[in-house]
Amino acid sequence: MNATGPVIEVKGLTKVYRTEEVETHALTGIELTIDPGEYIVAMGPSGCGKTTLLSILGLLETPTAGEYRITGTPVETLNAAERARVRNRHIGFVFQAFNLIGDLTVEENVELPLVYRGSIPRAERRDKVRTVLEEVGMGHRLRHYPGQLSGGQQQRVAIARALVGEPSILLADEPTGNLDSKSGEAVMELLAALHEKGATLFMVTHDPHYARFARRIIRLMDGQIVDDAETQEESFSSGLTHP
């Protein structure tokens, strides 16, 4: 993890989707710096480019133009294998749909990012997994399968999977989108608590109720950042509920 310079630096980032008849500018001239320990929310109407931005930051998509550095490494210089390695070591993902594998246990799901690294002994992997599951309040569900868990519990497991590799940044795409309000609030409190412990978070949401947890809010419109400001709210770390 990078503790000195910015986690992410973006300059002039542009993304254009082209078909035979249509050219769509999803992002235009994005300038963004994320420092270690920040909690940032990106908001905006449907189609404004916030999910495209998250996908590029997560190395799931490639920008059409512009510069992108993650922990000081210029992304445009990386080949596919190097991008996958950087993604595995520096980025944790939390998706709206959880994306857990149904025929693997909670423990096995969370272990996967460490398995992909290929160099961590099994005993060490399992210790890391159990530690992070305790941190998100799911240590008692090691042997359960995703289908045996509530939506809120599945999202906690997904957060544990994102955290287990000690990423430089956690990217969350509408993490409460498939949850009821009580479970969604509990997940947001968990993310706030992780931020208080030093995690760097970048979250996309359409819900201003959940945006209040962040310390900085970026607003996008028509593929451009139209506002970038720190919030005045206190962080919401608290005792965590277990939906």
Image: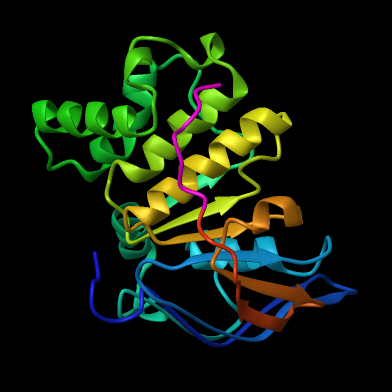
Does 203 sit above or below residue 95? below
Residue range of the region highlighted in magenta in the rendering:
236-243
**Where is residue 195, by image quadrant?**
bottom left
Q: Is residue 210 visible?
A: yes
Q: Is 123 contained in the magenta span?
A: no
**Where is residue 49, by image quadrant?**
bottom right
Instruction: Report the quarter where the C terminus lies.
Output: top right
**Residue at the (64%, 36%) spot, across then down:** 184
**Residue at the (66%, 48%) spot, across then down:** 174
* Percent x, y of residue 182: 67, 29
Nearer to me, 113 or 32? 32
| Residue 30 placement, left or right of 43 | left
* Percent x, y of residue 155: 53, 32
Q: Residue furthest right?
A: 21
Nearer to me, 233 or 11? 233
Give the colouring mode of the picture: rainbow
Q: Is 242 contained in the magenta span?
A: yes
Does 142 sit above or below residue 5? above
Q: Is residue 179 visible?
A: no
| Residue 190 placement, left or right of 6 | right
Nearer to me, 242 or 235? 235
Count of numbered labels shown in the rendering: 0
Instruction: Report the quarter where the N terminus lies.
Output: bottom left
**Residue at the (36%, 56%) spot, across then down:** 199
* Percent x, y of residue 187: 55, 37
* Percent x, y of residue 228: 64, 81
- Magenta: main secondary structure: loop
